[in-house]
Every structure is written in C-alpha cells, then in structure tokens.
Amino acid sequence: MNLPTVIGALIVFAVFAAIVGRGLYNKKHRKGGCGCGCDHCPGNSMCHPK
C-alpha cells in the first residue's frame, strides 16, 4: 500500500466512525431521527419508549 491509499482509507474510516458515534450519542440521549413530529406516527412507540 502506498501513502495516498492509507490516507484515503483513514479519512473514510473517520467519517464512518463519526456517523456511527453520532448515532450512538443520539440514541443514548433519546433524540429521535425523525423530524416530522412523532405524535401521530405509527412507529412512535419504537422511537420513544415509555
């Protein structure tokens, strides 16, 4: 492997890790992924357990 390949792979991995980390953070802090107002959503109980 040469240096540009390693740098490119590290950038892709960093973006992937940031996306996964943000998703875990949001799940831990009970922030839903939808912005439609979940009051009338059929999947409300899945996003916001009581």
Image (cartoon, rainbow, N blue to C red):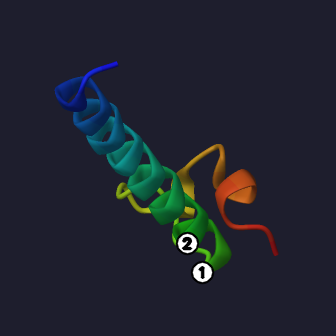
Amino acid type, mark 1: His
How many numbered discs sit on the rendered protein? 2
Residue located farthest toward the right when viewing the structure as drawn: 50
| Residue at image mark 1 | 29
Percent position of residue 43, x then y: 66, 46
Please rate how many residues cluster around mark 1, counting C-alpha atoms within 10 Å: few if below 14, some from 14 to 19, many from 20.
Answer: few
The Cα–Cα distance between marks 2 and 1, rounded to whole angstroms, is: 6 Å
Looking at the figure, which quarter contains the C terminus?
Answer: bottom right
Residue at screen point 61% across, 75% down: 30
Q: Is residue 42 above or below residue 31?
A: above
Circle 2 residue: 25
Q: Residue furthest front?
A: 2
| Quadrant placement of the N terminus | top left
State the image coordinates of residue 16 (x, y, percent, origin top left). 42, 43
* The one of 7 and 36 positioned closer to us in this rendering: 7
> Secondary structure beneath disc 2?
helix
Q: Position of residue 31 (x, y in %)?
A: 52, 72
Q: Is residue 50 visible?
A: yes
Outermost residue, top side: 1
Which label is found at residue 14? none
**Residue 34 appears in the rendering:** no
> What residue is drawn where x is 36% and y is 50%?
14
Q: Please, is residue 4 above or below residue 40 in the view?
A: above
Q: Amino acid type of disc 2?
A: Tyr
Q: Is residue 32 above or below residue 19?
A: below
State if disc 1 and disc 2 touch (CB < 8 Å).
Answer: yes
Quadrant assignment, res 11: top left
Q: Which residue does the image show at 41% across and 41% down from the upper left?
A: 13
